[in-house]
Image (tube, rainbow, N blue to C red):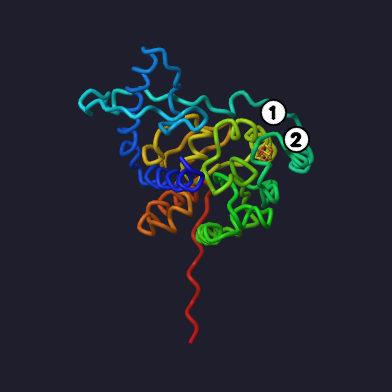
């Protein structure tokens, strides 16, 4: 697959995943898994795809001419459950955000360093009760070195203000700190390399509530490959904080009808933090 087509297909798969239509393409994966099993039996060496997506690190799966009836149905396929990358991360006693930033330095620990402009460490209140975690920096974030400053970031700011908070009262960061080329999803090894820094940030901030924005953040922290639509809006215990996942603001830009669902989720967060929505301003004139 050429380098222009792959990011487009990835973006579409992510879009369908955000819509909760994972089985739409998992059905196709099931066919491929069936083919993988056949390849194994015939001496092939293909590994299972990560999170139901095509494994990008290995050779492409063979084109099968077997009829669909022979394929394993999606619900019969046991998808790999990702171990939470945070469970194994050692926490440093008395850690601070400046010390973590210093430890990151001019990081070259994973391949995302190659095309990045700036490391996007995170931004906001070091003692915030509420932390938002997205997937990774985009173009605007990479240029400015700040999280959520593009169109999706403006929407996130509006969401925060609708909760009765200022943006500088919360903390905002991402799963990976460098922009994946072409805004592709970060690969699992990149997440594994970068996520200990995020875990240290959360340990230093000690928020009451963590809100995961989108499936990548939620799946990474919770160690699941379930579609976000299956657990969005539910509370989880996460290393001393309460965690809730909701849709990413970029998804809301594409699908404004989902805003009401996200607002329901944010109201749960407000209730947890004892926040009341701001009173509407009186109309002038
Ligand atoms: S994504 Fe994280 S681990 Fe990778 S180079 Fe950037 S800061 Fe380092």
> Which quarter of the rendered image does ligand 1 occupy?
top right
**Left or right of residue 118, residue 211 in this image:** left
Residue projecting furthest to the bottom: 285
State yes or no: discs 1 and 2 in contact (Cβ < 8 Å): yes
Left or right of 244 on screen, residue 77 = left
Q: Is residue 94 left or right of residue 172?
A: right
Residue drawn at the location 74% of the way across and 42% of the way down: 97
Q: From the image, tell me which residue sits under label 2.
A: 95
Of residues 1 and 138, which is closer to you in this image? 1
Q: Which mark is residue 228?
A: none
Residue depicted at 75% across the width and 29% down the height? 93
Q: Tag 1, which secondary structure?
A: loop
Which residue is painted at 39% across and 25% down in the image? 79
Q: Nearer the viewer, residue 108 or 258?
A: 108
For label 2, the SS is loop
Query: Residue 66 appears at what percent x and percent y?
Result: 25, 25
Percent x, y for residue 146? 66, 54
Alpha-carbon distance for marks 1 and 2? 8 Å
From the top left corner, tell me how far across and down residue 102 is, in percent.
Answer: 79, 40
Quick one: label 1, few (<14), some, or many (20+) residues within 10 Å?
Answer: some
Quarter occupied by residue 92: top right
Per the image, the residue denoted by label 1 is 91
Q: Is mark 1 within 8 Å of ligand 1?
A: no
Q: Is residue 35 above or below residue 260?
A: above
Considering only vertical position in the picture, is 136 above or below 51?
Answer: below
């Amino acid at each position: 697959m050429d380098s222009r087509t792959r990011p487009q297909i990835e973006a579409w798969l992510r879009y369908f995943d955000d819509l909760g239509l994972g089985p739409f393409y998992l059905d196709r994966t099931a066919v491929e898994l069936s083919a993988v099993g056949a390849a194994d039996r015939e001496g092939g060496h293909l590994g299972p795809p990560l999170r139901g997506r095509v494994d990008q690190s290995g050779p492409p799966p063979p084109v099968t001419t077997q009829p669909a009836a022979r394929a394993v149905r999606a619900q019969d396929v046991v998808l790999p459950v990702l171990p939470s990358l945070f469970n194994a991360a050692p926490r440093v006693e008395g850690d601070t955000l400046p010390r973590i930033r210093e430890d990151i330095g001019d990081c070259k620990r994973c391949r995302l360093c190659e095309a990045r402009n700036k490391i996007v460490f995170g931004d906001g209140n070091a003692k915030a009760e509420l932390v938002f975690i997205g997937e990774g920096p985009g173009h605007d974030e990479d240029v400015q070195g700040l999280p959520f400053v593009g169109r999706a970031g403006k929407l996130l700011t509006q969401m925060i203000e609708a909760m009765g908070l200022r943006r500088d009262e919360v903390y905002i960061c991402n799963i990976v700190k460098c922009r994946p080329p072409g805004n592709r999803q970060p690969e699992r090894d990149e997440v594994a390399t970068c996520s200990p820094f995020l875990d240290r940030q959360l340990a230093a901030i000690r928020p009451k509530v963590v809100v995961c924005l989108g499936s990548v953040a939620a799946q990474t922290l919770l160690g699941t490959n379930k579609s976000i639509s299956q657990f969005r809006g539910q509370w989880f215990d996460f290393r001393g904080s309460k965690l809730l996942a909701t849709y990413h603001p970029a998804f809301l830009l594409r699908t404004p009808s989902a805003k009401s669902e996200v607002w329901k989720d944010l109201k749960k967060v407000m209730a947890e933090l004892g926040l009341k929505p701001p009173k509407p301003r009186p109309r002038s004139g």
